[in-house]
Image (tube, coloured by chain):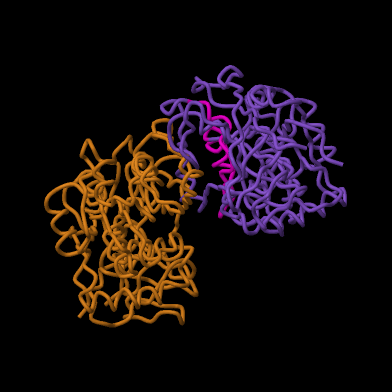
Chain colours: A purple, B orange
C-alpha cells in the first residue's frame, strides 16, 4: 500500500462559551509530513474524547497551556504503525499514543507512545480502563489516596470511565464500603449490578448531603472526586478524621468562567478532621503504567472489572462525542472508531 | 501553705458575633474540687491565648466541639504542682497543661500534661515556641509539608508565634527562600532583622499577588498558611508543581459566619500543579513533642531562633489579650502572667 499523503484532523475553530458545541470545531485536511529519524507514522484505529480536554479550550491554567485556534484537539488513540524510523516500534505494531483527533499521526520521536501487547483484550481498552481513565483511577487510589483495607470510599461521577474503574478497584483493594453518585436508572442499575457498588446516590437529590450520610453513616475515608468544587464542598463535612480527597477531574467546573466557579467554603474541616486533598495528573506515573495495566488486564480477563463503552463512527463524530460528555444521558467510555482493526 | 479552697476562671458569657469582645467573657469564682486519685492540683503561673479558640466559641465544626455558655475558655498554661496524687508529678514540679483560663486547676489524671525540665529557658516558652505554636510550626513543616532543602517557602501571618517559628525553622531545614506576609513597619523590621526572612510582603497591598510573585519569581514549594481561604486562593496560582499547602490556622475566617466564608475558587491548580493541601492539629504529634522541643530549645540557646512575647498581667486581662489577637497592631506570643515564677 502506498504511503498516504494526506490526512484529516479536528481543530479548535473558536473557544467554547460554556458547554462546548460541535461547531466550536472544524475538520481540516492536511498533508502528512515526513517521518523524522527516530519517529514513526501511525494510522489511527480509534480515538478517545476526554473531559479534561475542556480546560485546554479556554484561556487559563490547566495541566497544559491552552490550545490555540487551529490546533488539533487533544486525545488519545490506538493506532497501527505503518512506517517506522525508530527501533522502538515496527511496522504492524499496535500502539497507544496521545496523537489527538486525527486519522494519521507522525510520532516525532518523543512523547507518549506505548506498545500494546498482543492479547485477547479489545484494542479500545487501551484508551479506556487500560489507558488514561483506568490509570487515573489506579494511581489516584494507590498513590494519591493511599487507600487502605477497611476504608469507606465515595466516588463521584461513578458511572464515568474513571469513576467506575475507581469504585471497582477500591473494592478490590479491600474498601469496607463503596458508594457512588450517578443520575438515572440505567447508570444506577449498571453500577449496582455490574460494578457491584454498595450504594448509588442520585446527585440531583435536593437532600444529597443527607443521602450520602445515610449511605455511609460512619463517613468516608476517601473521596475520589471527578466533579468539582460544589461536590467536594458538600462532602467535606462527611469525611472521617484523616480523610483523603483525590481531585481527579472537575467536570462541573470546566465550563465555568473563572469568576463563576463556586469556591470551597467548608475548609475548616481540613483542620477539624485532618483532611488532605491532592490533585492528580496521571502522566506523572507513566513509568508504572505497565505493571498497573497488567493487573487491571488480569481483573478484566477474570471478569472482576466491568467496563462500558459508547461508540461513535468516523473522525467527523469526534466533536459530537466530546460535547456529549457534558450533556448526554448515555454513559461509558466514548470511543470514536476510525477503521476496522487489522486482523 | 494551706490548700487553697477557691479559684477564679474565665468562662464564656455569650457567643461572639464576629470579632470577640472582652464582655463576651465573665470572671467567676468557684470552689476547687478534690484532687482525684491519679490527679494533681496545679497553681497556674502563666496562660496563653490562642486564635484557634475562636472557632470553639461559635456553633459548628472545629477540632473539638463548641464550648457551652459558662464553660472555662480553652488555653494552655504553665503551672506549679501544689498537691499530687500521682507518681507522674511531684509537688514543686513545673508542668505545661491545657488547663484553660484559670488560676488553679485540678488535673484529672488524663489529658495533656508535660513536665518542664529545669533549664535556663524562660517558663513562658513552654506555652510559646516550645508549646503549641512552636510545635505547630515544627510538625507542620516536618510531617505535613515534608519540607526539603531547596524549597521556596511562603509563611503567612509571619509575625505571629506560629508563623515566625515556621519561617525560621524552614530556614534551618534548608529552604532556599523564605518569604513572609505581615503588616506594619515594626513587624517587618523584626522579621527581617531578627528572624532573618528573605523578604516580607505587606498583605494589605492591593497588588499582593504580584508582590508575592516578585518576592519569589520561581514560585513557592510550600505555603504555610495561618490566615484562611482568601489568602490560600490568592496563593494557589503561585505554587510550584508538587507544592504543599499546610492549613495551620484560619485567623481571618474564624470570625466569619458560616455563609460568609470566602471559598477557594482556584482549585484547578490542584490538578494543573499537582498540589497537596492538608490540615493540622498538633496534638496528633504529642508523643514526638519532647524530641522536637529539645531541638527547638537548642536553637534558642544558640541564639538561632528569635521569638517575641507580649505580656498581660492577671487573669482578668485574659479576655483582652484574646480579643487583641484579632485587632491589635502589637505582635508576639500573648502571655498572661498570673504570678511570679517560683525561685
Q: Position of residue A240 (x, y in %)?
A: 59, 50
Q: Is residue A246 magenta?
A: yes
Residue sitting nearer the eye, A1 or B201: A1
Residue at left offset 35%, top offset 39%: B230
* Residue furthest front in the image: A2
The answer to whether B188 is drawn above or below residue A343 in the figure is below
Q: Position of residue A99 (x, y in %)?
A: 62, 39
Q: Which span is picked out in magenta?
A: A229-256
The answer to whether B246 is drawn above or below residue B122 in the figure is above
Q: Position of residue A121 (x, y in %)?
A: 83, 47
Q: Is residue B43 visible?
A: no
Residue at left offset 51%, top offset 33%: A56
The answer to whether B239 is drawn above or below residue A263 in the figure is below
The answer to which image quadrant residue A147 occupies is: bottom right
Residue sitting nearer the eye, B333 or B221: B221
Looking at the image, residue B309 sits to the left or right of residue A188; the answer is left
* Residue furthest top in the image: A23
Looking at the image, residue B331 sits to the left or right of residue A309; the answer is left
Q: Is residue A300 magenta?
A: no
Residue at left offset 62%, top offset 44%: A224
Residue sitting nearer the eye, A93 or A154: A93
Question: Which quadrant does the C terminus of chain B fall into?
Answer: bottom left
Q: Position of residue A21 (x, y in %)?
A: 59, 19
The answer to whether A226 is drawn above or below residue B337 in the figure is above
Question: Which quadrant does the N terminus of chain B fall into?
Answer: bottom left
Residue sitting nearer the eye, B46 or A306: A306
The answer to which image quadrant residue A310 occupies is: top right
Amino acid at each position: 500500500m502506498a504511503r498516504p499523503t494526506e490526512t484529516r484532523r479536528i481543530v479548535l475553530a473558536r473557544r467554547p462559551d460554556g458547554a462546548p458545541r460541535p461547531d466550536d470545531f472544524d475538520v481540516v485536511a492536511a498533508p502528512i509530513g515526513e517521518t523524522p529519524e527516530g519517529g514513526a507514522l501511525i494510522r489511527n484505529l480509534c480515538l478517545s474524547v476526554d473531559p479534561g480536554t475542556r480546560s485546554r479550550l479556554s484561556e487559563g491554567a490547566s495541566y497544559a497551556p491552552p490550545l490555540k485556534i487551529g490546533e488539533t484537539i487533544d486525545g488519545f488513540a490506538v493506532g497501527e504503525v505503518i512506517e517506522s524510523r525508530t527501533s522502538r516500534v515496527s511496522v504492524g505494531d499496535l500502539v497507544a499514543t496521545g496523537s489527538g483527533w486525527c486519522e494519521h499521526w507522525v510520532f516525532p520521536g518523543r512523547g507518549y507512545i506505548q506498545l500494546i501487547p498482543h492479547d485477547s483484550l479489545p484494542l479500545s481498552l487501551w484508551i479506556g480502563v487500560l489507558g488514561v481513565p483506568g490509570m487515573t483511577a489506579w494511581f489516584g487510589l494507590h498513590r494519591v489516596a493511599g487507600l487502605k483495607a477497611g476504608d469507606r470510599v465515595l466516588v463521584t461521577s461513578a458511572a464515568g470511565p474513571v469513576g467506575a474503574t475507581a469504585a471497582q478497584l477500591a473494592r478490590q483493594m479491600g474498601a469496607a464500603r463503596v458508594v457512588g453518585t450517578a443520575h438515572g436508572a440505567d447508570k444506577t442499575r449498571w453500577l449496582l449490578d455490574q460494578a457491584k457498588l454498595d450504594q448509588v446516590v442520585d446527585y440531583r437529590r435536593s437532600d444529597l448531603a443527607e443521602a450520602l450520610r445515610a449511605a455511609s453513616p460512619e463517613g468516608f475515608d476517601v473521596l475520589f472526586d471527578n466533579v468539582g468544587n460544589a461536590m467536594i464542598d458538600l462532602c467535606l463535612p462527611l469525611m472521617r478524621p484523616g480523610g483523603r480527597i483525590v481531585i481527579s477531574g472537575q467536570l462541573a467546573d470546566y465550563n465555568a468562567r473563572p469568576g463563576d466557579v463556586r469556591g470551597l467554603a467548608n475548609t475548616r474541616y481540613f483542620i477539624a478532621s485532618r483532611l488532605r486533598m491532592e490533585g492528580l495528573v496521571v502522566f506523572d506515573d507513566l513509568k508504572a503504567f505497565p505493571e498497573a495495566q497488567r493487573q487491571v488486564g488480569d481483573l478484566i480477563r477474570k471478569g472482576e472489572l466491568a467496563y462500558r463503552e459508547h461508540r461513535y463512527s468516523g473522525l467527523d463524530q469526534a466533536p459530537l462525542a466530546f460535547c456529549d460528555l457534558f450533556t448526554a444521558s448515555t454513559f461509558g467510555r466514548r470511543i470514536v472508531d476510525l477503521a476496522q482493526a487489522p486482523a
